[in-house]
Every structure is written in structure tokens, then in C-alpha cells.
Amino acid sequence: MQYDVIVIGSGPGGYVAAIRAAQLGNKTAIIEKYSVLGGTCLNVGCIPSKALLDSSEHFHNAAHTFADHGIEISAPKINIEQMINRKSGVVKKMNDGINFLMKKNKITVYNGLGSFVDKSTVNVAKADGTSEQITGKNIIIATGSKPTVLPFIPVDKTRIITSTEALNLKEVPKHLVVIGAGVIGAELGSVYARLGAKVSFVEFADSMIPTMDKTMGKELQKAIKKLGADYYFSHKVTGVVNNGDDVTVTARNSKDEEVQITGDYVLVCIGRRPYTDGLNLEAAGLTTERGKIEVDEHTLQTKVPGIYAIGDVIRGAMLAHKAEEEGVFVAETIAGQKPHINYNLIPGVVYTWPEVASVGKTEEELKAAGKAYKTGSFPFKALGRATASGDTDGLVKVLADKTTDEILGVHIIGARAADMIAEAVVAMEYRASAEDVARMSHSHPTYTEAMKEACLAATENRAIHT
Ligand code: FAD
Ligand code: NAI
């Protein structure tokens, strides 16, 4: 079978690329090695983790904040099986949604492992042992990523687990040791801390979510500490041993002392690696560079004409919306259009409570670049809306060019930060100054008033409510 566009991998990069390619009139096929579409994000990533974050947040509120609102209930109990089943139901609904979109856009779906035969032919090895070869004028590689594993951390998927198993536990751990206090650690650590587990974070860097603006990490640590978590920062894990009923993590601290932490489960979340296993890239004339497929910055085309790559398998942030943007970008490039992605304005969100959301440059990046900047901050505790809901933790921090006042970065920790960041993305896309945003009317009472106030603070320190 001959196609205009073949997409390998059905995550947010791949399925979105397929839809856009089909919309543009291309005969399109998508190959997925699993029996369900949606990739990491839908099946073992963004969506199931958010479903559990929401369920655990409801439990936490029922146990800890309802009484304050004058709602009296007897102590809530966790039915972990139901919580996990609900999560699986959410995923299933969305799997069905993608199947519908494939049909609607007349995209042919092949379930099986895709591997290159040559630069325009892909073999699909199916679960029943049969295989089929299809050819494409254009091929888009969207094979995503898998958790990073280290030789001295023997992930056994029962007690020493990755995020995939953490989304399907049959019990709430008594003591969950989380190796890596990055995005997955913060989110899934929060889930189990809210459900009553003792959570210990062992982190190589000196703070949580160390790649984000330092203020965010500091504030998030305080919030998660309130759930009873403890931290081992500047600790490098050197070994993990499953003792049967419990697991011992060994780490070295900054004084080079050995520290041991024992829990009943260990969650390993120390980053993810691009995934190209089984693709047989060599047959297409492709290689990887430190695991990633190299692409041309202007077209996302690999060194082989007609073969493109997008999403987690190439450079850049490993985020679903970044993969989606690249999927649309490549489909439009193939159609001869001249699309554009502003990588500086891909927001990053951590769905803890309070949520953390960032776009643009961090303060540390501006300092390192020697850029003259000014900051404006506004705390949630000074907001009417936050006081009414009881969500007073957090702040908005705006970084603006010292001379021109152009907004260079916005970092929010607080209730609904994930949604609030969209305003900052729009403002920065249109190269707004802090004063531009400060002069726009924001509904009262809303959390977004913190954005306006932080912009007022950045322009001549004129926030009204602090
Ligand atoms: P993937 O989603 O990884 O999809 C790749 C697909 O290709 C897979 O289905 C795979 O089976 C298939 N495949 C691989 N090789 C082959 C082959 N040879 N033949 C056929 N098929 C193949 N990002 C966010 O933006 N927001 C979030 O809230 C968020 N939460 C996350 C939570 C967790 C726990 C994890 C692990 C990740 C999360 N992410 C989140 C990251 C997000 O999931 C990824 O950035 C995103 O899925 C990348 O999309 P992709 O299309 O590049 O690849
Ligand atoms: P991460 O890169 O966010 O965090 C990994 C952490 O592990 C880092 O802080 C690192 O310093 C630490 N680390 C590495 N080696 C270590 C060692 N030997 N000992 C102790 N600490 C060590 O990676 P994570 O959390 O695994 O997530 C992978 C990716 O998945 C994220 O970078 C993100 O792109 C994506 N993701 C996105 C989410 C979102 O957008 N909300 C949610 C979850 C994942």
C-alpha cells in the first residue's frame, strides 16, 4: 500500500500529525505498536496521572479542608481499586475519542511494530505474527520516549517501579521513596502523599523541579512538605536493593556520607530517554545522536529527505503540547506551507496543588545571559479569590526587560496556575510589556488578578494590594 504520509507512533505528536496531514488532503497511515492509540501521554502519562491527581485531591480535601468549609463528614476512606478503575475509564474514553478521529479523517491505522525496510518502506510486524509492508512519500517518526533506567537501580516493576506502575498500584504505599524530585516525582509523589503515604524524595540537585525558576522549587517544597514529605537534596543515589517486603535506597550526600532510606515502594523518575528500539533506523540511512534523532531546525526533516521526526524522540522539552505543535508543523511543511513554532513560548506545568506553571526565561537563565531585567511578584494570599477558596499558597513572578519592559518570563505557583499561564503565553507571543498587561482589566475576584498585580509590581513597583 502506498501513502502520501506514514506516521510511526500514535502519541500526541503522531496522531496530531496524522490528522493535520489528512486535513491537508494526504492519504495518511499511522502505525502503533500497542493495541491502543494515544501513546505515553494518554495511556501512561498526562491523562492517567491527572486523573489520579484529581482523585487524590478530592480525598485530601474531604479529609482536611471540608470541615473548615463547614462540611461535616465522617473520615473518608480510600478505595484504591475504584480510583484506579476510574482512571482507566478516563483513559478508555479518550482512546475511543482518538479512534473516532482516525475514522473521521480517513486515516488507516496499523497496529504493530513499525520498522524501516528502506527510506520509504516500513514493515509492520503485527501481534498475530503476520507482517505487512507499506510505502510512503513522507514518513514521520513519532516514537516518543521511555523512562531512563540506571544499571544500579534494578526496576522490577513490583517494588521498584517507574511512573507506569505507579499509575496502577493495588495499595497505597506506607513509605514511598521517590528517586528524582522532578516533574513526575512531584506529581506522583503528591498523589500518594495525599492518600496517606509517607513520601521521601531523594534528589541529586539541591531543590525540587530544579530546571524551573528556583522560586518555584522553593515554594513547591514548602507546599509538599505540608503533606508530610521529607527531602534528601544533593543526594546521589548509588544503589537500590529489594529486600522482599521493603526496599533500601543508598545515596551519597554532599559531604560524601552514605545515607540509607528504606520504604515499601521506590518510584524511579530520573528522566526519560528517546525511544527508537526496533525502528531499524540504519535501513533508512539514519542514526541517533545521544539517543535522539537529529533534525533540521527549520523543517524537522532528518538527514534523509522525506523522513521527519517530532516529539520526545528529538531535542527539546518532552511535553505533549510541544509534540503536538511539531506534528502540525511537519504536516504543514510537507504540504509546502511555512509554519512556525516559538520554542521559547512552550509553557511547562506541574500539576501539583498548588500548580506550577512557567513560560519564557527563568531568573537564573537571565542572570547567566547577563540580561538586565526587573521582577514583579504578587502573593496569592493577597487575592480575594484565593482567600475565598482557601488556596492562599503561591505567587506570580514576572520577569521583564529592564529597559523596554517586555515580558521575558512568567512563573506562577498557585491555584489554577496551569490555566493562568495561557495569558502569559498570549502576552509574550505579542511581545507585550509588563505595563501592557498591568493596564488590562482582569475580572474580580479571580486568580488572574495576581498576574495583573505582578505586572504592576514589575512596572515601578505599583501593585495595589500589597
Ligand atoms: P509518545 O506519547 O511517547 O508516543 C509514542 C508512541 O509511539 C507510543 O504509543 C509507542 O508505543 C509508539 N511506538 C514507539 N516505537 C514504535 C514503533 N517502532 N512502531 C510503532 N509504534 C511505536 N506532558 C505534558 O505536556 N503534560 C503532562 O501533564 C504530562 N504528564 C506526564 C506524566 C507522566 C507520568 C509521563 C511519563 C509523561 C508525561 N508527559 C506530560 C510527557 C508526555 O507524555 C510526552 O511528552 C508525550 O507523550 C510525547 O509525545 P510523543 O508523541 O512524542 O510520544
Ligand atoms: P525530570 O527531568 O523532570 O526529573 C528528574 C530528576 O531526577 C531531576 O531533578 C534530576 O536531578 C534527578 N536525578 C537524576 N539522576 C538522579 C540520581 N541518580 N539520584 C537522584 N536524583 C537524580 O524527569 P521525570 O520526572 O522523570 O520526568 C520525565 C519527563 O516527563 C519530564 O522532564 C517531562 O518532560 C515529562 N513530564 C511532564 C509532565 C508535565 O508536563 N506535567 C508530568 C510528568 C512528566
Image (tube, rainbow, N blue to C red):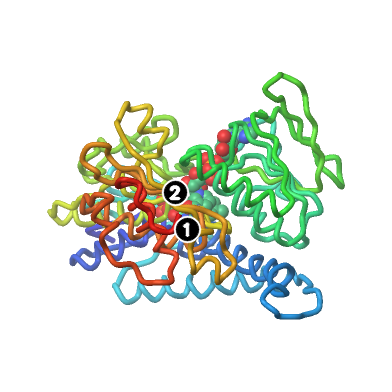
Q: Residues within 10 Å of mark 2 (few under 14, many from 20)?
A: many
Q: How many marks?
A: 2
Residue 142: image location, x then y, percent:
38, 50
Question: Can you tell me whether the CB of the residue at mark 1 lies under 8 Å from the nearest atom of ligand 1?
Answer: yes
Residue in the picture at 42% in, 55% down: 320
Residue at far top of view? 256
Q: Indicate left or right for 137 with 271 as reference.
A: left
Q: Indicate left or right for 159 with 424 as reference.
A: right
Residue 54: image location, x then y, percent:
59, 67
Task: Read off the residue under disc 1.
Answer: 39
* Mark 1 vs 2, N-terminal side: 1
Task: Read off the residue under disc 2.
Answer: 144
Residue in the picture at 40% in, 39% down: 362
Residue 57: image location, x then y, percent:
64, 66
The quarter holding residue 375 reads: top left
| Contact between labelled residues 2 and 1, with CB atoms less than 8 Å apart | yes
Q: Amino acid at mark 1?
A: Gly
Question: Can you tell me whether the CB of the residue at mark 2 lies under 8 Å from the nearest atom of ligand 1?
Answer: yes
Q: Nearer the viewer, residue 251 or 87?
A: 251
Q: Nearer the viewer, residue 463 or 238?
A: 463
Q: Is residue 433 above or below residue 20?
A: above
